[in-house]
Amino acid sequence: MSTNRSLIINGESKSVDVPDDMPLLWVLRDVLGMTGTKFGCGIAQCGACTVHLDGKAVRSCVLAVSAVGTRAITTIEAVGNTPAGARVQKAWLELEVVQCGYCQSGQIMSASALLTKTAAPNDADIDAAMAGNICRCGTYVRIRQAIKRAAAEQATQ
Amino acid sequence: MAAVFNRRTALQLSGALIVSFAIPLGRGRAATQPGKTPVDLGSVESFLAINPDGNVTVFSGKVDLGTGVRTALSQMVADELDVNMSKVVLIQGDTDLTPDQGVTFGSLSIQNGGAQLRQAAATARRALLIEAGRRFNVPPENLRIEDGMVHPPQGEPVALAALMDRKGLSLKLDKTAPLKAPKDFKLVGKSQPRLDIPDKVTGQFTYMQDFALPGMYHGRVIRPPALGATLLSIDEASIADIPGIVKIVRQENFLGVVAKTEWAAIKGSRRLAATWSEWNGLPSRVELWEYVRRTKIVKDDVTSNTGDSANALGRATQRLAATYDFAIHTHGSIGPSCAVAQFDGDHLTCWSASQATHNLRRQLAAMFSLQDDQVHCLYIDGSGCYGRNGHEDAAADAALLARAVNAPVRVQWMRADEHGWDPKGPPTLLDMRAGLDSTGKITAWESELFIPNGAAGFVALVGADHAGLNSLGTLSPGGVIQDLAIPYAIDNVKTTAHRLESTPFRPAWIRSPGRMQNSFANESFFDEIAAHVKMDPLDARLRYLQDERGKALLERLAALSAWRTWGKSSHGAKHMGRGLAYTKYELVRTYVGVVCEVEVNRDSGEIAVKRVFVAHDCGQIINPDGLRNQIEGNVVQTVSRVLKEEILFSQSKVTSVDWASYPILRFPEVPEVVMDLIDRPDQVPWGAGEPTAAMVPAAIGNAVFDAIGVRLRSVPFTPAKVMAAIKKS
């Protein structure tokens, strides 16, 4: 069944007419042309599709659009407008975290959600928050450093 | 979905073709103009154009697979021409524009691709300085170039581009054109920010997976439920209720769904009712190694033969033998492979993340009985591939579907397609033997490798095979016999690769192909010998090395890791240990040594790799931070391969088709990586995308032996295998 519905994405209201079972990922990528969020597995095993719903990291590949409701969606395109997201992106740039980068939108979204919730995460916090985001290029070492740098910057502000 | 195009304007100017480009990374809609540039390897203009606005366009046949070579190659050209990095625009992997510099693999992009670009830049530089000298009436050596401007001893400078109208770049590439001296480098050797990272951090980068054309449809393929199954029937009505389905495409055993939206294509491919024949022609997994050993040998490649190893083994007072195996692996790209194809009459255009667009063009041309020049392949960065993954196969799928609907079609594989159908790193089996004299000196070394025949040729395209079309495919596992020969000076050595007629799954190269597996056996077995004669693993290697640069690297590694003073410890069931591995990659280039520090739990069999020390000498370093990132990636990816990875299969198909059944390393398991980069600015730059990976398996295995006295000879080192090895000891 197709329904015309309104979604709050990155602070703007967007109207889409899509089947109820279409996962949010394809609404973003295919319908709205917001391709920063990536398809990796389709079964919430890799984290490439991570977005925020009301500030919490969720996997958009298994989230039917009909289940989003009125919750605010934030994507990689606008996470830099949040304090944590801005610090995370800055740290990512400073440490040159990225290799191929395909997983990095999801990594950044998970890291931003972590820092919003836990201002000064320790290694165990990072492990727990980031364990659902996999990277094949092996940038984990730098991701951990970048999260710590972003947290440190938060502390000095 | 976003669209991106290379917008080009080709100008013919005084005999020199000057091409200017802009690559909007944003969301602009398509606007192509025809344009071709020379692509032969002997002309400067195949590699370079200096544009009227001062920008330098670099045409690179080597592509950035996410490793940062876009930046490193730009550094090399900018430095050689003395232009600002920001003036360099790199076009990669476009069969109409970029020369065929060979497949982007083998850690050769800097070493070979970069060397060609640099030579082209040096040839251009010399010609431009001669021209400037003529204009200024001064000897060229009295001129200097700064930020793209040629400065005479006195007077106003002139832009490089302004010198082009007479001489252009229609020059033969001159291998003797003088290169800049290392002391004069301004960009090379210094960390430069990667050009692609800002857009990748903000979601603005257009990956292949994000590329779209106007009027483009989405396709999904439905692979057979068994590798060799044939399609008996389909029930088109089974998906008639899904809005947006455009066409069900069937050609022999190739089956796909084309739809207006990606979600409709996915749903259609999941729900389409199809009946396939049964097939169970794969070997039983528990008998894989017997199967490999039984497979017909079509030839032997003797990769090294010194002295008389058989005789020396016979005379040896002590003999050691061991067998090693390395499981079948997938590339494991996070983004499933993707391509877009479009037919315009009998002309095919295909966008893909192929590491070999020129080869892909030949394969697609063969598939559709076209001439090569009727096919245009363009590279767009995709998810990292780590070898020949499914990108080329997705291209074939997209082309088959695009032809059937006469519209542009995008195909992205699903996760199960990537795990199930990308070409695999073949199962690798090695028998090792050594002989020692009464003093414990190694007098003989023999190895026998069982590996599929073939080299880095054309890997058959899955869609073509299923559709009954020829894609020029041959058995192509990559250069898998490399690094079977050893870097040590032993009097009697014979290393033999038995080349097998077949292997269970379509093989292809995976990062450090063959080198990783062969080095695993070599460096593990060498460690076994050292332990047998009670020699320290480092001292044993130093004893048999004659290469001073290699010895120097090992000393740097020893210092970095405090090898000689580190003391192992244990608490409860957990035991710490360290292992070492060394090679000179392919015996002709990058030197690398690795020390792994592990903690092994004797009760559970779990191995945690805690720290990895790497000493690395790839000659001249182009971009130090980029190099560090590559080495970190090599370590993490290979720790994953060694501890966890193995393709599972029934006798019909791959059964490990997701990240739960084929797990890879996650955050809590990541080691600390410590490295010492040895820069040799006066030496040629060698590759770094692979060599470290080849060292990690043996370094881990040797560390486990150090920790608990048990040898692991079968990758992956799963807890079950560790427990079995403990029990056996």
Image (cartoon, rainbow, N blue to C red):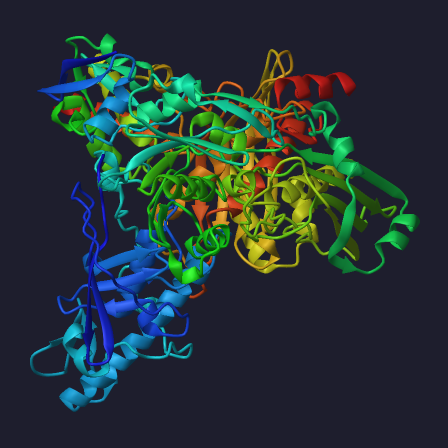
Of B578 and B141, nearer the camera is B141
Which residue is painted at 62% across and 12% down in the image? B604
Horizontal side, residue B139 vs residue B604: left or right: left
- B82 and B181: which one is in front? B82
Q: Work out which quarter of the rendered image holds the C terminus of chain B and state it.
A: top right
Q: In which quadrant is the N terminus of chain B drawn?
A: top left
Counting from the top left corner in percent of width and height, residue B76 is at: 32, 62
Residue A91 visible (yes or no): yes
Q: Is residue A48 above or below residue B120?
A: above
In percent of width and height, residue B400 lies at: 43, 42
Query: Is residue B482 or residue A47 the one in the foreground?
Result: A47
Q: Quadrant of residue B538?
A: top right
The quadrant in which residue B329 appears is top right
Q: Is residue B531 visible?
A: no
Q: Is residue B54 left or right of residue B378?
A: left
Q: For this view, does B178 lie left or right of residue B195?
A: right
Check the image and name the residue furthest to the right.
B315
Residue at 67% across / 20% down in the picture? B722
Q: Position of residue B719 (x, y in %)?
A: 62, 18
Q: Position of residue B271 (x, y in %)?
A: 43, 18
- Asked which quadrant contains residue A127, the reply is top left
Picture residue at 37% right of the left edge, 59% below the top: B95
- Relative depth, front residue between B376 and B534: B376
Q: Where B385 falls versus B262 (above or below)?
A: below
Numbered label tally: 0
In the current view of this chain or complex, which residue is farthest to the bottom?
B137
